[in-house]
Amino acid sequence: MQIQDLPYPDPGVPDVRSGPRFLWWLWRNQLGGQLKSLAWGLLHFVSVSALPFCVGLAVQAAVDRSGERLALTGGLMLVCGTGIALGDTFLHRAAITNWITAAARVQQLLARKAAHLGSALTRRVAAGEVVAVSTGDVEKIGWFVEAVSRFTAAALTVVVVCIGLLVYEPALGVIVAVGLPVVALAVLPLLPRATRRADVQREKAGRATELASDTVAGLRVLRGIGGEELFLDRYRQASQEVRHAAVRSARMWSLISAVQVLLPGLLLIAVVWHGIDLARQGRITVGELVTVYSAVMVLNYPLRHFEEIAMAYSFSRPSAKRAARVLSLERSTATDGTREADVPAGDLYDPATGLLAPAGRLTAVVCGDPDAAGRLAERLGGHPAEPDRSVLLGGVPLDELPLDSARTAVLVQDKDPVLLSGTLRELLDVPASGAVRPADALAAAQCEDVLDALVQGSLDAANPMDARITERGRSLSGGQRQRLALARSLITDPEVLVLDEPTSAVDSHTEARIAEGLRRLRSGRTTVVFTSSPLLLDRADQVALVHEGGVVAVGVHRELVEGEPRYRAVVTRETDEELAAADEDMLLDALQELEEIEESA
């Protein structure tokens, strides 16, 4: 896989049993790129390590005044330089390709999982954690996956050089062969503590990211209640914890780096000390001493990759663990379905609550518990939080349909819809039947003032459709965002449209016009609206009251207000005292009527 070929047609099914297993799965799935990186790495490292032998031969040729050997050595150095240049260039190219393709695979897996889970994702994992995994964690994971092949090339080069020194000069080669494993493995006792500190740092950084993301998302509300300073203090405390953890982690890694500098230096001193003694005794030549000395010096370069792989693994392991946790989440129901990918039509029925929304009618649902209303709305869309009896559309269980067909049949707009950044044209460019034009949907949702605000806020957009919407529509008011989201849902023209409090942030006059527009535009289509607004309820074909998990009353708004106290309590916001007083008045009126009947009899 090359960078220009991204995205992957299919990123595959990851092994998410643990963080290390996920890293191993990523490495195996780009084996071709890893082998390329290994081959170019070997060429580069071996060419670098061969230079000391060339230098030693050149020095000895100069000492022996042999022009032929000096010329031959110069040719060998030219070959090594060419190998270094080619190896370094293509190693870097292969390594970056491995890094980016691994990160892209993880991002595709996360995006697919988010689309697969839908709204259930943010109920089971904090939104800030998803952001942290898809940004910083992806980078750390890609770093380790890429570094494995370079580390392998460096380790093989060290082995080759040790064998070469043993063959070339056994007296000094033994010291190098014994000392290099000690140098390479000396940091192992320090790695567990460094890893723990790195885990703590990543954990605290993830919490700070979650806090920052959630604070920014709710900034408008925080300003409304004067809570900016409170959350600023919380984030300041979290950031200081991250700083302290980062300093503690950096101390360990600086100690590891110091060990990686100190021990090779001591090995070099030992080699030079013993080599000088051997040269004085005439057992080795000056060129051989220079060769061994240069080889030990150059070995510091591949040995650095031992430290890098340890650091990469320490930082990527918690990141891979978080990614694996998100990718291991599953829907409560299957997505493949057991029926053909057809979109059914007919009545929408929920056997769990007894709610029936007749086909082609506008049904309003009143529920005193907003959380229960949200869960019921998700059930109607085929996205239950827990396995249960499936909602039926035209007698067909939504659970038995493929996920795409179920989402095409029933569209659920929750009470907090999200507007993505981009132009209004891009926002409204959604899968749709084509029967509803954007202009008609915007008019039904009463978006005239929203269009004017978008044009005024854009310097180079005379057409509202070309005006840009900021991230989550932050430049718009809550009511304006809500109406744009409603227009987007109306354009899709699904068989069944479920709206959860679609007008909670607009004024009563606008709400009345939206109710009329919604009824007109959705004529002949099944629409379910969760609301307690009398303006919407009065225009519904039927109203269902859901209480304690079941439908307890069905009728029209005016009849339910007069004859159902529980309905009246939710719609009119009556308190228990007011309900008791109303019941008492009704009882007195009934007694008075009975007395009048008895007297007349």
Image: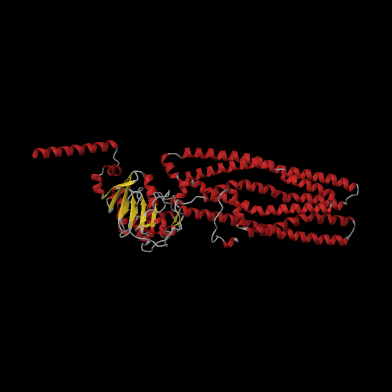
Q: Position of residue 358 (x, y in %)?
A: 30, 56
Q: Position of residue 574 (x, y in %)?
A: 28, 40
Residue 466 in view of the camera: no
Q: Position of residue 57 (x, y in %)?
A: 84, 56
Counting the numbered discs, the total is: 0
For the point 63% across and 48% down, which residue is it? Answer: 313
Q: Is residue 578 left or right of residue 170?
A: left
Viewer-side residue, 178 vs 302:
178
Q: Position of residue 558 (x, y in %)?
A: 24, 48
Q: Residue furthest left?
A: 601
Quadrant location, the C terminus: top left
Q: Is residue 266 left or right of residue 191?
A: right
Display coloring? secondary structure
Residue 570 in view of the camera: yes
Q: Residue furthest bottom?
A: 434
Q: Is residue 181 left or right of residue 200?
A: right
In this picture, is 512 found above or below 262? below
